[in-house]
Amino acid sequence: MELRLANEERRDAYAAQRRAEFAERCREHGLPVTPQRLAIIEALLDSAEHPSADAIFARVRRRHPHISLATVHRTLETLCEIGEARKVTLLHDSARYDGNVMPHHHVVCIGCRRIRDLEIPALDNLVAGRRELGGFKLLGSSLEIHALCESCAAKETRRRGKHQAASGKTRTS
Amino acid sequence: MELRLANEERRDAYAAQRRAEFAERCREHGLPVTPQRLAIIEALLDSAEHPSADAIFARVRRRHPHISLATVHRTLETLCEIGEARKVTLLHDSARYDGNVMPHHHVVCIGCRRIRDLEIPALDNLVAGRRELGGFKLLGSSLEIHALCESCAAKETRRRGKHQAASGKTRTS
DNA sequence: AAATTAGATGATAGTAATTATCATCTGAGA
DNA sequence: TCTCAGATGATAATTACTATCATCTAATTT
């Protein structure tokens, strides 16, 4: 199985395209295109450092000294909701511990945060068989499969049904 | 590549052995074996739910009504340090965002929290090729490879050197 | 171009999770 | 039993985030 660091030049081209299409993506989702949103997506696409809200705030502030930290937090979450950003730390609301210290992986329900253990020996071997990568000394790995458990999937279906009906009504009104 | 849910019965046997060996593991690391530590590892090994500190606190409280929440937090971190527990949420101190919404993975330095993008198409295909697993509807995946970047690896080596020298002295004193 | 308005923003209060502090207590070796 | 490094409990402090609300503005309508 191939495992490689992401290519830098490809990232630049990707970021340029995403920047160019951002306003349209907002419109598609019925979101006003504000200078704050533009500044935040810009900062996010400029950075390869997987920044925190605070880091984005610091960067955006240079050009928009009046922006509020709350706006940065809100906007980053909004961007994730419309698929224009990704939260690297899915389960960061409270720390979760595991008594099983053998190498293993997890399926995580994005609704209720339920977690189940997975075994993927081939993946453990892949990482164990490699000492370093791009200057990083590899220690171990953890695959997090994002999923919906049965009850959350059912809720999601109901919610989408309602939401579609509601948005259908507002659009025609 | 094989991908399967962890086996429940195997987990029970594993937990039993870990419980039996816990006091010795503490001694090996120079940690006193306290009733609180025993109660916390017990609760962690009993649970398959990847509990939060709060969940462990609630469970341990039933038998140890005087235990403090701070002790639970401290002990869980201590257990991770000596390798008797694992924190599922490595990067949970502050949320991190990524402008790249294409499927990809990450190497994370456990020292400075630096993150670099990884590409593992075979892994993306593995998850994309499977709709569900044990009642979970699969949506996507994210592999987090835990590592030490070059500068943190250097620091670690220095720290270990010092620590070994220091502990050597205290042991002979 | 002005009016309208849903939703965005900024300022700030509030909350939740975690960490720090410190007086007291206790496990474990002498 | 004595000693004391380190553990614990109570609680204050901190950090990251979320809620509230008055004001503002993007974008549609007139």
Image: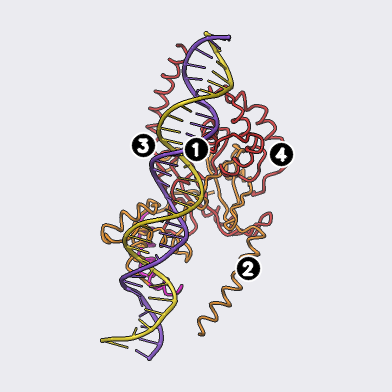
Chain colours: A orange, B red, C yellow, D purple
The answer to whether residue B58 is above or below residue A54 is above
Magenta highlight range: A8-32
Tell me the number on the disc at residue B63: none
Q: Are marks 1 and 2 in contact (CB under 8 Å)?
A: no
Label 4 and label 3: CA atoms lie apart by: 40 Å
Q: Quadrant of residue B99?
A: bottom left
* Residue ID at (34%, 55%): A57
Give coordinates of residue A26: x percent, y percent. Answer: 42, 71
- Majority secondary structure in the magenta region: helix
Dot 2: chain letter: A
Viewer-closest of C6 and A11 = C6
Q: Earlier in the sequence, mark 4 or mark 3?
A: 4
A20 in magenta: yes
Specify the label residue A157 is tagged with: 2
Which residue is labeled 4 in the image? Answer: B10
Q: Which residue is mark 1?
A: A139
- Residue highlighted by disc 3: B151
Q: Is residue B147 left or right of residue B64?
A: left
